[in-house]
Amino acid sequence: MALKGLAKFVIVLTTVSAAVMELVDTTIVNVALNDMAGGLGVNIEDISWVITSYAIANVIIIPLTGFLASYFGRKNYYIASMIIFTIASYLCGQSGSLVEIIIWRFVQGIGGGALLSTSQAILFDAFEPKDRPIAAGMFGMGLVLGPTLGPTLGGYIIEHLSWPMIFMINIPIGIIATLLSISFIEKHPDEGKQKKTIHIDYTGIIFLILGIGFLQYVLERGEAEDWFASATIRWCSIIAAVGLIGFIYTELTVKEPAVNLSLMKNRNLAFTTIFTFVAGLGLFTSVYVYPVLTQRVLGFTAFETGLSLLPPTLFAVVMMPIIGKTMSKGVSAIPFVVIGFILFAAYSWMSASISPDVGKWAFFLPLAIRAVGISMVQLPLINQAVAGLSPKEYPSGIALNNMIRQLGGAFGIALANNYIARQYAQHRMDLVSNLTSSSATFTERTNQIAQGIASRTGDIAGASTKALAVINQSVERQAYYLSYLDTFRLITIFFILVIPLVVFLRNKKKTAAELEATRAAAAEAH
């Protein structure tokens, strides 16, 4: 039902704020990883689970959102999700161990995954059909601003307060949004009355949780535990395989699946999900690797890192409405996808060529190219995913596509962690092999550092040992720097390899009615 006046304003404010809050939380922790690792007494690779657990929760809940909203009623489900998200945010901030914060980040992701999709559906209902492009534009701005503001806001909080506050800021927003939702969001006439007619696919849901959860553990911990030499990794691999095979079999055979995998028989959707997976991998991995590189190696503060991301990413704010308007005229999504992938590959390759002695704005051009690339793949991939599907299949197709994107992101972070660890060990070994007593350069450099330390501290006896420690730190910094650059190159390869598959995508112009149906489906299944 379309609303007017104050009610419409409140709905817009509430839904966009809730969506932005959820999106901010997907990126706000990226610049806080160093501080969180130090505060919890773990390394960077382990603390990455804070990002991964949130992504896994999103992977599980996003394709189930439409079903859960129908079963419990959209308003009830929306409010419950907001309460879960807010409480979990508080408990994340109160966490005192790695395991504790991983658990609460997962719970936060369960609540957050519903906020994004349901917010858009509620917002669309507040507008007449002819005005829904305006609603889509408002929500699109939020989709871009949320991830953009996250690192900058997180950096400011880290620099002036402490890392728990990046979660605590959600509490007042969550409480106000919950109260406004209770007061102003209207229930549909048949909301919550479908329980008796909806079959709950418990088996499929359980298999999905087991398959994705244990697979992610294997990907995250495999390198550290020497892969299949570890009994834990072997058992987790078996459970993951059983879960994924059981999930696929169940969803293809059950009458009312939680995730309609039968849609993958559509060639266009099947190949679009490959592009979506790689897009998710690139987006999540780059947002993870860049802050760690700038803080761990280049010496940026958390706030400087966040600030360096803000101006170039605003290019996407400008591009999103332009692309949306162009596509609303029936222009094919395929050229946007190809150009977007080429731009993202260019960003990754340029980032892999950055010197370790760069200034604060050396990444501006690569990040601006990345922002334009992002804007050219997001909406076009959603539209391309449903090309060839019937309107009634749009929600399931978009939900499946979005699940694959989140899965690509979780896989990408795990891949990056393992690849960085492997490359770091190799680069360190290569660097250390040149640091021998027979090397005149090494001996001269060690003596220079030792003399400097002795002159400052007066500790002549311990100066040589301290000089070796300084050189070791320099070797570690260089080895990490090279491994991060290698990771950017790896991302580039993924994007380049997938581009030729564009020949399998279906090029179909949509009618105005189909475009409206796509927007409505995206609202329900984002």
Image: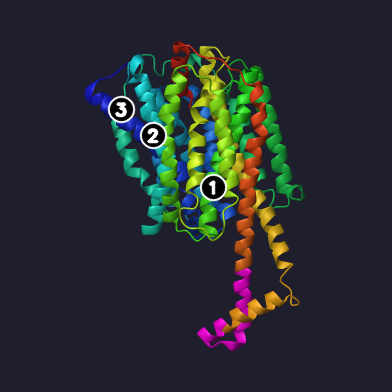
The magenta stretch is 452-473
Q: Where is residue 463 in the image (x, y as percent from the top left)?
A: 60, 83
As drawn, the label of residue 414 is none
Determine which residue is flagged by label 1: 288
On screen, residue 241 versus residue 63, left or right, reads right
Determine which residue is flagged by label 3: 11
On screen, residue 25 versus residue 467, left or right, reads left
Q: Position of residue 95 (x, y in %)?
A: 46, 52
- Which residue is at the far left? 5
Cα distance in 3D space between marks 3 and 1: 33 Å
Q: Is mark 2 on a helix, strand or loop?
A: helix
Cα distance in 3D space between marks 2 and 1: 21 Å
Q: Foreground: 432 or 200?
A: 432
Q: Where is residue 108 in the image (x, y as percent from the top left)?
A: 46, 40
Q: In this view, does 107 lie above or below 478?
A: above
On screen, residue 431 versus residue 99, left or right, reads right
Q: Position of residue 28 (x, y in %)?
A: 44, 47
Q: Is residue 466 magenta?
A: yes
Q: Is mark 1 on a helix, strand or loop?
A: helix
Q: Foreground: 20 or 57?
A: 20
Q: How crowded is mark 3: few (under 14 residues within 10 Å), some or many (20 or more)?
A: many
Q: Tell me, yes or no, if residue 38 can be seen here.
A: yes
